[in-house]
Amino acid sequence: GNPGGGGMMDAFNSGMQQSQPGYSPYQTPAPAIPEPPKVLAKSGMKLGGGAAGGGLGLGGKGMKKDVMAAMAAEDNLFGGTGAAGGNAFGLSSAPPKQTATPSTPLTLVMEEKVTVQMNREGAVESAEVKGTLTLTANTDAGALALVNVNKAQLPAQFSYATHPKVDKKAYETSGTLTLKGGKGFPLSRGVGILRWSYAGDDVAPLSINCWPEDEGGSINVNIEMELTRKDLVLQDVNILLPLGTTDAPVVESIDGVFKHDSRAGMMCWHFDQVDANTNATASMEFSIPGSDPDAFFPVQVGFRSETLLCPMEITSVTNSQSGAAIPHSMTKSFA
């Protein structure tokens, strides 16, 4: 079976510059939902071009990767969080911030990072997800935690590995994560106690099809988006296109909204949410001065999701001495 659920597409290895005050969105996106999702996920895709450093990519040669990456770094394009590419255009809602002071004895974070590379036709060339379960003991009670996961229900196609200091036998027999020799976890320092990984075409939840056509002095671009994993709901979907010019695109038709950054020569096609019920497919058509169809690659995609690809769950957290349940906070993050 396919791995269950998932955000995807980790941060792209190139980016876009921040939009300038003079640029206005084609259409104003709906305001951010005040209640943050319980599970956070960020991911990225790229179509074309190399995918070093992660991302989902769609076809492209001669991409000025170093220049674009430098622009992204200079402008803190992704806000230090990964792949929410549309934030540079002010289209994405900011993810909820962690509270400064831990309110529970134990903090657990499940994080997945995905790298997807697709060719210009949208076919997946490589796709991999890597996940980590990180434990932070905030109090002495938290340091004594026994963490149990649903090991018996985890998909066999994933590879799993415990930290060398974790009792591997206890994990393999009962799904219990604890340090060898009954030692407590270090205080106030995150420890990655379990990792997992999976490679397969079904890691990619979206497919992108981008068709630039030279019409003599101008380029007509048709681009389609399809949700290929109908079990997923994606938020803040941002599809980033290089334009090869500072000229503004003339949009003929569009599902969703867009914003243009002339200084960076980039365009962001944005959806607040993509799901199987309302917009599993979408398209946009625009024209722009130019003569090089290669200029529109790589196409990059970023989004958040409330579901990880690996259906791992924490079944219990107990005190290794008393057996009592330990209060804990749990965050799932896809970056």
Image (cartoon, rainbow, N blue to C red):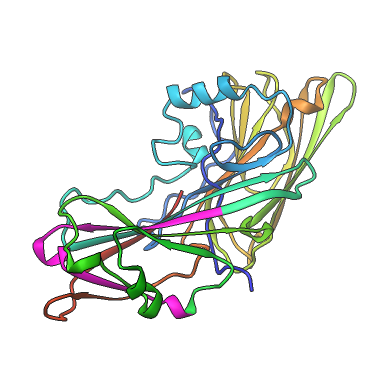
Q: In this view, does 242 lie above or below 101?
A: above
| Of 226 and 161, the residue lying toward us | 161
Res 314 visible: no
**Residue 148 belongs to the span the image colors magenta:** yes
| Residue depicted at x 74% and y 37% | 59
- Asked if residue 220 lies left or right of residue 266, the reply is right
The answer to which quarter of the image holds residue 26 is top right
Q: Is residue 215 above or below residue 306?
A: above
| Residue depicted at x 35% and y 68% | 168
On the image, the x and y values in percent for residue 267 come to 62, 32
**Residue 268 belongs to the span the image colors magenta:** no
- Asked if residue 332 lies left or right of residue 143, the reply is right
On the image, the x and y values in percent for residue 58 come to 70, 40
Q: Residue furthest left?
A: 140
On the image, the x and y values in percent for residue 235 come to 51, 54
The answer to which quarter of the image holds residue 149 is bottom left
- Asked if residue 121 lies left or right of residue 52, the reply is right
What residue range appears in magenta? 129-152
| Of 277 and 165, the residue lying toward us | 165
- Asked if residue 173 lies left or right of residue 139, the reply is right
| Of 82 and 126, the residue lying toward us | 126
Q: Quadrant of the N terminus?
A: bottom right
| Residue depicted at x 15% and y 54% | 187
